[in-house]
Image (tube, helix red, strand yellow):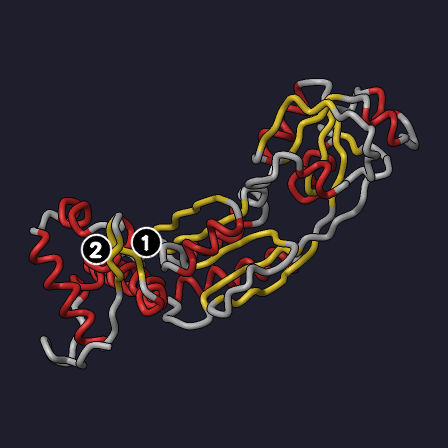
Amino acid sequence: MMESHSIMGDCMEITQLQHFVSVAKCGNFGRAAAELHVTQSALSKSIKRLEAFLSATLFERTTRGVQLTVFGRGLLDYANVIINERNRAIAMMASIKGRAAGNVVVGVSKHLGGYMLPEATARLIGAFPGLWVEIIDGYLDELCDRLLSGEADLLFVAYKDPVHAPALVYEKLMESDSVVICRPDHPLAKKASVTRAEMMKERWVLPVEKNSIMQFYNSRELEAGDDDEVNFPVLSGSSQFISRFVRQAPFIAVTPRHAVADDLAAGRLAEIKGPIRKRAPNIGIVMRRKGYRAPALLRLVKEIRAVCKNT
């Protein structure tokens, strides 16, 4: 353990945190120094000052470079949040000078991008005309990482089980289930009841999840047998692609009902009545448990809740 404040006074500079994050990312002082455009000596001194202030060793040297200690791992998430919040504060000050209302970054599940959020966002812009809103989509674990690091302010996601992160708060707003879809003129669309064997013979579009190309079997949506062969030549993480592709080609697909609700209601797609298991993933918002919540962010949360309630 290092001696507290032996090199510097009672302050921790943002530059030191930026240096720390860069070394942690690069795993090497030389590469980090090049990335930061500083000398390796200056970078090393900056890290030593930070370690002295925290009374903790942040890196351990290895034959390949450096790796984070338990103290370094504990600091990393906070350092990212501090850096991102500092950047947001600067952007907010600039936007106020320009009579804008700041910015809000929202992370969205890939299957939810066009569902309810556009209406809530339009209402938000109506209340904050100068607001800049950025929508980023991705998979749940990636989005949670971006929320924890401060890159995103809010998540609007579908999830089965909350990601275990005490720093995050989940608020369930509604549920959804699964549906098998096809074109209205598809032969299976005209049948009152479709067997599993009939469905297995069709060509499928599979809505994949990250690291789970075989989600169809893993989730056993159709209670498939071990000897079943499923023909799914098209894989996509986009619900919009899936719905439009099925409208164009004689394929069938399993997808969240909310993602195709408008197409089903308008008759552009048809639901196949078959032995599909009805899943009910949660749809809701995720925020950091602590930290400043700007008025625009609180208003967006209010609008999302209202849209979900009326859906």
Callout 1: helix, strand or loop? Answer: loop
- State the image coordinates of residue 5 (x, y, percent, origin top left): 14, 80
**What residue does disc 1 label?**
130
Q: Quadrant of residue 251?
A: top right
- Is residue 270 positioned above or below 99 on the image? above
- State the image coordinates of residue 118 (x, y, percent, origin top left): 52, 46
In the displayed image of the protein, which residue is found farthest to the front? 63
Left or right placement of residue 138 versus residue 90 in this view: right
The amino acid at mark 1 is Gly
Give the mark nearer the N terminus: 1 vs 2.
Answer: 2
Q: Which residue is found at the position 25% from the left and 73% from the top?
A: 56
Which quarter shows the N terminus?
A: bottom left
- State the image coordinates of residue 222 (x, y, percent, origin top left): 81, 37
- Is residue 178 positioned above or below 248 on the image? below
The amino acid at mark 2 is Gly
User: Marks 2 and 1: in contact by CB < 8 Å?
Assistant: yes
How far is disc 1 from disc 2 in space, using C-alphas? 9 Å
Left or right placement of residue 42 versus residue 82 in this view: left
Left or right placement of residue 177 versus residue 41 in this view: right
**What residue does disc 2 label?**
98
